[in-house]
Image (cartoon, grey):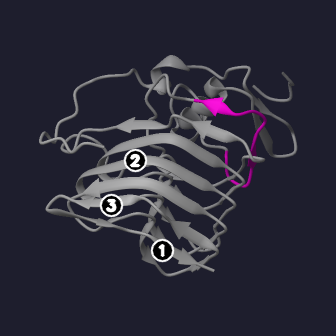
Amino acid sequence: CDDHVHGEWSESLSIKPDKKYWVNIVTSCPNGYVEDSEGNVFIYSAEGLAWLISVCNNLNGAYNNIYGKTIHLINDVDISEYKWTPISYFEGSINGHGHTINGLYINEDADNGPWHVSMLGIIYGNVYNTIFQNSHVTGRNASLLCSSIMGGSIISNCGFNGSVTGLRGTAEGVASYNSGIIHNCYSKVDVSGFLEPMGFLSRNYGDISNCYSAGHVEYRFGTHCSQFSLE
């Protein structure tokens, strides 16, 4: 794998099995995941992006060697065919180069699933220049991008589109917690949940600038529209 070039609210808190998991489909490093000797990883396909799950979560014989590396999206990728397994923590950088990640799909049980569901878990790194389109995240304490953006991390020039459903706990369009920097991003995510559903972020102890949220937010016991703009 190295140095080669190539909605509606559901009354039930239990999620029935639907799509297969990517982690059970991509069980070895695919041609769409290319790493060079200078700390760059190039993603060419949905399978390549899905391999990141195994790398970050130490699955399928992979080990987490993402620290300090930059992941480059070379193409738009559509990952809607299978289900994404939430990553526990992410310590690298993603540069989407203006490309789109389409169809992120997470659907986890409220009782037996992870404590927090999101694409990247806790971020100790950066995400740049990436559009997330047609994303759908369901589970306990649910967010689209991550649970936490830690100090020193930067999220910049990103767009978030889709829906997040928190079966229990919190629910956010982008992240639950931020102590880093979020700049020039938007959230058009419809969010529903029991506790403090937020269209963009729940708790901010960092810097946010030139961002806006325009999604609809639904409490379990009522609705309101959560929109804001920060310049």
Q: Quadrant of the N terminus?
A: top right
- Give the residue drawn at x 74%, y 20%: 31
* SS category of the residue bearing label 1: strand
Query: Magenta part of the protein: which range?
Result: 66-78
Taking the magenta stretch, the answer to whether it contains residue 112 is no
Q: Read off the residue under disc 2.
A: 163
State the CA–CA distance, disc 3 to disc 2.
10 Å
Camera-side residue of 11 and 225: 225
Q: Is residue 134 left or right of residue 223?
A: right
Identify the mark nearer the N-term, 1 or 3: 3
State the CA–CA distance, disc 2 to disc 1.
17 Å
State the CA–CA distance, disc 1 to disc 3.
12 Å
- The tally of labels here is 3
Q: Position of residue 90 (x, y in %)?
A: 57, 52
Q: Is residue 29 visible?
A: yes
Q: Read off the residue under disc 3.
A: 217
Q: Residues within 10 Å of mark 2 (few under 14, many from 20)?
A: many
Camera-side residue of 223 and 155: 223
Identify the mark nearer the N-term, 2 or 1: 2
- Give the residue drawn at x 86%, y 24%: 4
Q: Position of residue 123 (x, y in %)?
A: 56, 59
Q: Which of label 2 and label 1 is nearer to you? A: 1
Name which residue type carries label 1: Phe
Which quadrant would residue 33 be assigned to in this image?
A: top right
* SS category of the residue bearing label 2: strand
Name which residue type carries label 2: Ser
Q: Read off the residue under disc 1.
A: 228
Up the image or down, 44 lies above or below 89; here it is above
- Give the residue drawn at x 44%, y 35%: 105
Identify the mark nearer the N-term, 3 or 2: 2
